[in-house]
Amino acid sequence: ELEQKKQENHQLMNEKNRLQQMVDRIKDHHLKISQELGFALSTPMGDEVTDKEDTPTEKLRPPLRKEELLQGLPSGEGSSFSLHLYEEFLLFLDSKGCSSVQPVPSPDTAIGYAYKEVREWGKIAHGEEASFLEYGVEQGFLTKSLVNKIHLCPQCFRYKLNLRKICPHCAHIHYSKKQRGNYTCQNCQKDYPSHQYRFDCLNCGFSFSLEKAILCNLYEYGLVKGLQKQGSPRQKPSPEGK
């Protein structure tokens, strides 16, 4: 009996190690993609709805700290984004009559949006545009404001998703019109007050619940008031603009 317990403990340890390795691989994949996109990816929206169809990948994907997600974001003295680079960028924006840069639809990118002016300028490596702008905010050259939120696939981190309304009991898509405050499923004949939502990724084929989607914030970046006319960040303006 003692030998059997030892074997069971050994098997449990092996399984634990296997799961930990899987978690580590998923974390590495998550971080690699977030750095590639140049955007900070938030963790899942919540776990309020239990989904029986969730895959082991969804359940094991751990929430990543902001610092982990932003490891690719330069900061401090070691940044590759120099002051001279921001001077050039501000002059470029001034030549185009721009006081801000906004994310615009770009179907060829992973998240479906890009910063057109930064790309046109051509001095920042592809995938580092948001990091460049974020560092400008950190250094006081730029401001930012939230303008949109988009959902990404938790498996491949792409934006091409199809949203389906389904029965919360059998996941069927056919239902009758709402009657007496409920919908009726045409498959299982059960009534329910509201639909459940599922995404199908058109890129990798992964199916997941709304609560498991990766939420990505999109920001508009504007010039700090004191820099809009002088076009140089050599001296940061004070909060009062003095």
Image (tube, rainbow, N blue to C red):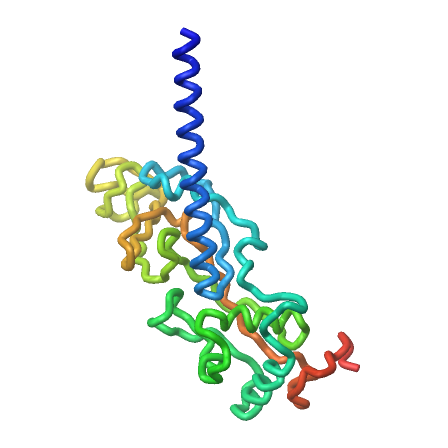
Please give the name of the residue rendered at 39% of the width and 12% of the height, measured from the top-left corner. 4
Please give the name of the residue rendered at 39% of the width and 57% of the height, measured from the top-left corner. 157
Percent across and percent down for residue 84 are: 63, 83
Quarter holding the C terminus?
Answer: bottom right
Question: Looking at the rendering, which quadrant does residue 143 occupy?
Answer: bottom right
Quarter holding the N terminus?
Answer: top left
Q: On the rendered structure, is 138 left or right of 214?
A: right
Instruction: Please tell me which residue lies in front, 237 or 162.
Output: 237
Question: Looking at the rendering, which quadrant does residue 201 occupy?
Answer: bottom left
Residue lying furthest front in this view? 3
Question: Looking at the rendering, which quadrant does residue 6 occupy?
Answer: top left
Residue lying furthest top in this view? 1
Q: On the rendered structure, is 10 left or right of 91?
A: left
Please give the name of the residue rendered at 48% of the width and 45% of the height, measured from the top-left corner. 46
Q: On the rendered structure, is 231 left or right of 175?
A: right
Please give the name of the residue rendered at 28% of the width and 55% of the height, measured from the top-left corner. 204
The image shows residue 78, relative to residue 198, as above or below, that is: below
